[in-house]
Image (cartoon, coloured by chain):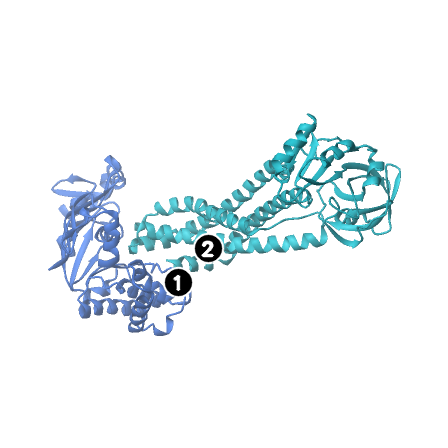
Chain colours: A blue, B cyan
Amino acid sequence: MSVLELDHVTKTFGQGRLAVRAVDGVDLAVDQGEFAVVMGPSGSGKTTLLQLMGALLSPSAGEIRIDGRPLAQLSNTDQARLRLRQIGFVFQSFNLISALTARDNVALPAALAGESRATRRDRATMLLERLGLGDRLHHLPEALSGGEKQRVAVARALVNDPPLILADEPTANLDSSSGYQVLHLLEDIAVTERKTLVMVTHDHRITTVADRLLWLADGQLRDRESDFATTSDPVCGMEIVIERAATHRQVGATTLHFCSQVCVDRFDADPGRFTSHLERSRS
Amino acid sequence: MFSFAARNLGKERVRLAISVGGVAFAVMLIVLLRGLYVAYETKVSDVVERVPAELWVVQRGTADFFHSYSLVPESTGDQVAALPGVAAVHPYLARQVGFSLRDEQTLLYLVGFDPADPVSGPPEVVSGTDRVAPDGIVVDEVFAANHDVGLGDTLTLNGFDLEVAGVSRGGDMVMYQYAYVTTPTARNVLSMPDQNNALLVQLAPGTDPESVAERISSLSSQLRVRDTDAMVAVNQRVITDSFLPVISVLLVIGFVVGVAVIGLTIYSAVLEKRREYGVVKALGARSWQLTAVVAIQALLAAAGGYLVGVGLAVAGRQAAERWVPAFVADIVPGDLVRVAAATVAMAVIAAVIPLARIARIDSAEVFRA
């Protein structure tokens, strides 16, 4: 059964000529216990996609369902309740509350959910001990290392026992060793607790532990990176997805694709400078 | 939520100190001003209430003893004394007297009384005696302190030398203080050999005051009879009309200062921690929970400020009583309850703008690195 489903989800920012499609017609279903990783370059729409999945943004088109419930049908209050009970968030910048100890940070979502003081403290203590932070219960975030902060954040994501964990670049601010530790921790959670885990990341180390690897480029999602037809912009040399190219020029039998109007203008000003290699290969 | 709010507030000690200090200043100002007002209102009513007479006979048209000058012929006293239901009639001579003391002009409110039956005499003697001789005078302790006057000193009023025989308490009216001499001496000093400023009427037990008042009024169209409550009311109106507007403005300023201090400190705390509020919102906090966090912080700052402010006001009053005898402030429980309510109102009003800012926080912001 799919815990998370996205049907033709599109998110557009701005209007008219300034409109930007951050997420473009994404279809996705993630099953219970599945560890799905979304990779892609900066600006490809990974974080926007995660915000949509987490009911923090509303799609411009399409439908998102969590446990079969369409998010669009939920009021703001119900969406907040859903985030509290059904989703655990792990952020790139940890986002711990500076005035609260590690234990109270973990207990915070349980407090928001109305759990008793004793229950939430017991649960937070148990989680932190399980994640190897039993001796850091009463430490403020400022006294914790990056890896410890992220483990506290993972514990916080788990405290209300949500079926879905959304992680945004959880290893980006960690050193190599701490990054591995957090990756294996998340893998372990997905495997042993049958949590559905969706992670967006640049971190290629994750490819070995993920159940499914997805690629996002210019807001479009593919199962494999090779599913995108790509080419190099002849002016700047950057790799671009052909169907998202700003425009193209035909040079003989060759179609040249450009990342932006800037490169097109440079090309039009002196085409020979950028097509000499084509001439040579033809001759 | 309480723990989160309290720790958020306590984490920034300097900001908390500014917030509590600002509210404390406002509360102290409000408590002392209100205390000052109550104290003067009490003073004015006390000088009337402590006189053991049920009725005051004054000249028609007399408003109060501060702003108008009542003259009642001495012969009227005999007529009133003869009326049924009247147990005793005492002459009341009381008037401001300006005089020179060590080359400085000063004022006393001179009251005549009978040392053997001190109906209008000093309320409390703190040193010396109130059994004064015809050339003796009892002065208020505030006058004595302000002018460095002590027992045995001589004051010359309208050419009459009077030796300070006693020092009393409870006769300070800010701009002048009460002083007491024998009634015959008062007649000489005030040049009122056959006139009184009022007659103090004591009734026989079981007598209806209204019927006696009617009988007295029927003696002359120039007489006006008031009971003690009415006398207190007309005298208190002096304070209400002159001080209340000024004190009201100062109270409002104190309130606004309190609102501004709480509002600015809580607002700056919200701005500084908007990302954390965004995190809490993203985690699933509902609007009322975020509202509660901000409101609790404002209320805690206000409560701390209230306690410190009341403490400072009490300490300030005690210090002032010691060093500035003219300063009086009656801090009464009812006023402390009202000031507490005003402090809660400060917190509620001050929380409005930070709450509006919280409502605009975009929880999606927390995904930014």
Q: Chain of mark 1?
A: A
Q: Is residue B9 left or right of residue B178?
A: left
Q: Are marks 2 and 1 in contact (CB under 8 Å)?
A: no
Question: Residue at the spot x=46%, y=55% of the render?
Answer: B300
Residue at horizontal 34%, vertical 74%?
A: A134
* Depth check, front residue: B114 or B280: B114
- Image quadrant in which you'd find residue B322: bottom right
Image coordinates for residue A113, horizontal then vertical, percent: 28, 59
Question: Element type at marker 2?
Answer: helix
Disc number for residue A100:
1
Residue A126's tag is none
Where residue A17 appears, as percent x and y from the top left, is 24, 35
Q: Where the N terminus of chain A falls, by quadrant?
A: bottom left
User: Label 2 lies in what chain?
Assistant: B
Same chain for marks 2 and 1? Answer: no
- Residue A154 position within the rendered picture, expressed as x and y whole percent measured from the top left: 29, 64
Quarter of image, res A179 = bottom left
Q: Residues within 10 Å of mark 1 (few under 14, many from 20)?
A: many
Q: Is B195 rendered above or below residue A175?
A: above
- Is any atom of residue A142 visible in this view? yes
**Looking at the picture, which amino acid does disc 2 mark?**
Leu
Does any portion of residue B369 appear in the rendered image?
no
Q: Is residue A183 above or below residue B114?
A: below
- Circle 1: element type: loop
B26 displayed left or right of A278:
right
Mark 2–mark 1 distance (CA, rounded to whole Å): 18 Å
Residue B314: quarter of image: bottom right
Number of numbered discs on residues: 2
* Viewer-closest of A29 and B207: B207
**Residue type beneath disc 1:** Leu
Q: Which mark is residue B300?
A: 2
